[in-house]
Amino acid sequence: ASEIRPPKNLLKEVLQIWPRLPGAYSILGVCKDFPNEMVAFKNGPPLIVGPAPGAVLVASDIQAIVPHTKKAVYLDDFD
């Protein structure tokens, strides 16, 4: 509970906890205090990012975003 506090910088907060995460994961971090920001990162499972009109799409399967965008980037581990 001592780690729960309002963040000052979403990316910095994620970078502090990321090294402590064990195992395989794909994570999308969002925070109500930063409504226009998100942080996506992975270790193992696929994570795909694609632009769409007025949005950025994040998915673990290309089929989820193909109907909405023709461009996609597969993130490498620890990207």
Image (cartoon, rainbow, N blue to C red):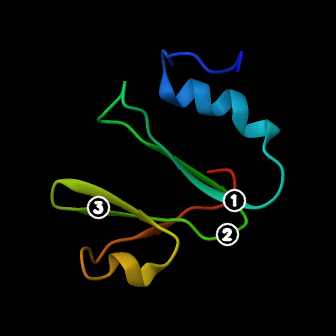
Q: Amino acid at mark 2?
A: Pro
- What residue would you read off at disc 2? 45
Farthest left residue in view? 53
Residue 60 x/y as whole percent: 52, 71
Q: CA distance from mark 3 to mark 1?
A: 22 Å
Say left or right for 66 vs 54.
right
Q: Secondary structure at mark 3?
A: strand
- Asked if the residues shown at circle 1 and circle 2 are in contact, with their CB atoms under 8 angstroms apart, the answer is yes
- What residue would you read off at disc 3? 51
Residue 2 x/y as whole percent: 71, 15
Query: What is the number of the mark on residue 36?
Result: none
Q: Amino acid at mark 1?
A: Tyr
Q: Amino acid at mark 3?
A: Pro
Placement of 3 over or under 28, stated as above or below: above
Farthest front residue in view? 1
- In primary-sequence order, the first of circles 1 and 2 is 1
Q: Secondary structure at mark 1?
A: strand
